[in-house]
Image: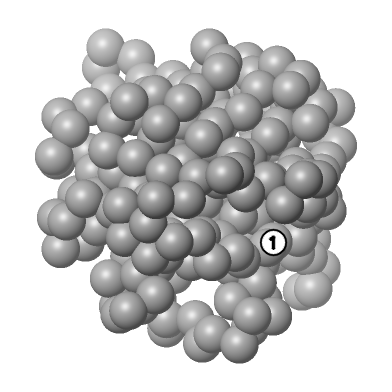
């Protein structure tokens, strides 16, 4: 694939990536969070686990060179390269219809959970009943010394990117997070496109 594939704002995409291939995801504007999942192609009940990744790496936020682990503690996806200064959140659950209903939004407001299910349906895969917690690329969730979290605007920059290198055949799913009730996608709360590209 020579060109980037756009993931339009507020939507999601799923792409099959074989072991040995690499996938680059690009923050086109610098302010957009991308919720990220991976499912084993051979057995989709094995999925990228933030809980196990934290346990195996003994850190809250993965960085370039870190391995990401499955719910069975298997090596799953190498976070091979990270261009930017931003941390990537492993604590916050994907947004869902209930968070928007409670914020006064409409029933049909897009959500990352909905984008996950829709993206898998588009490639003919059935989503699991329970959506795993995602790796939230470029989401800025500082943790203070007392363990209190806050949601802050991204510190990522236009053109920042991540390169993933799966070590098993996976389906990777990305959501251009539609959260517009906080500053998590920037102080202007405008949701923007991201893009991905399969690398040789």
Q: Is residue 182 above or below residue 52?
A: above
- Callout 1 secondary element: strand
Q: Position of residue 167 (x, y in %)?
A: 31, 52
Q: Is residue 78 left or right of residue 176?
A: left
Question: What is the number of callouts on the image?
Answer: 1
Tag 1 residue: 12
Q: Position of residue 82 (x, y in %)?
A: 50, 23
Question: Where, by quadrant of the figure, is residue 174 drawn?
Answer: bottom right
Question: Where, by quadrant of the figure, is residue 108 drawn?
Answer: bottom right
Question: Where, by quadrant of the figure, is residue 118 drawn?
Answer: bottom right
Q: Nearer the viewer, residue 147 or 140?
A: 140
Residue at left 54%, top 66%? 16
Residue at left 56%, top 16%? 84
Q: Nearer the viewer, residue 100 or 127?
A: 127
Task: Determine if residue 64 is in view.
Answer: yes
Residue at left 60%, top 64%? 15
């Amino acid at each position: 694939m020579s060109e980037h594939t756009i993931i339009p704002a507020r939507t999601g995409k799923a792409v099959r990536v074989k072991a040995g291939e690499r996938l680059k995801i690009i923050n086109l504007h610098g302010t957009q969070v991308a919720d990220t999942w991976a499912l084993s192609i051979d057995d989709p009940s094995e999925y990228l686990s933030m809980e196990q990744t934290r346990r195996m790496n003994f850190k809250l936020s993965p960085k370039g060179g870190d391995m990401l682990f499955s719910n069975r503690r298997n090596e799953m996806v190498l976070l091979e390269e990270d261009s930017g200064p931003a941390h990537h959140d492993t604590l916050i659950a994907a947004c869902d219809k209930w968070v928007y209903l409670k914020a006064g939004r409409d029933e049909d407001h897009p959500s990352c959970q909905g984008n996950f299910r829709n993206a898998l349906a588009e490639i003919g895969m059935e989503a699991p009943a329970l959506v795993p917690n995602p790796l939230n690329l470029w989401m800025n969730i500082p943790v203070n010394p007392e363990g209190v979290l806050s949601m802050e605007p991204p510190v990522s920059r236009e053109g920042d990117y991540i390169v993933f290198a799966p070590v098993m055949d996976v389906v990777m799913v990305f959501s251009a997070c539609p959260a517009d009730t906080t500053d998590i996608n920037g102080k202007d709360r405008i949701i923007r496109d991201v893009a991905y590209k399969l690398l040789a």
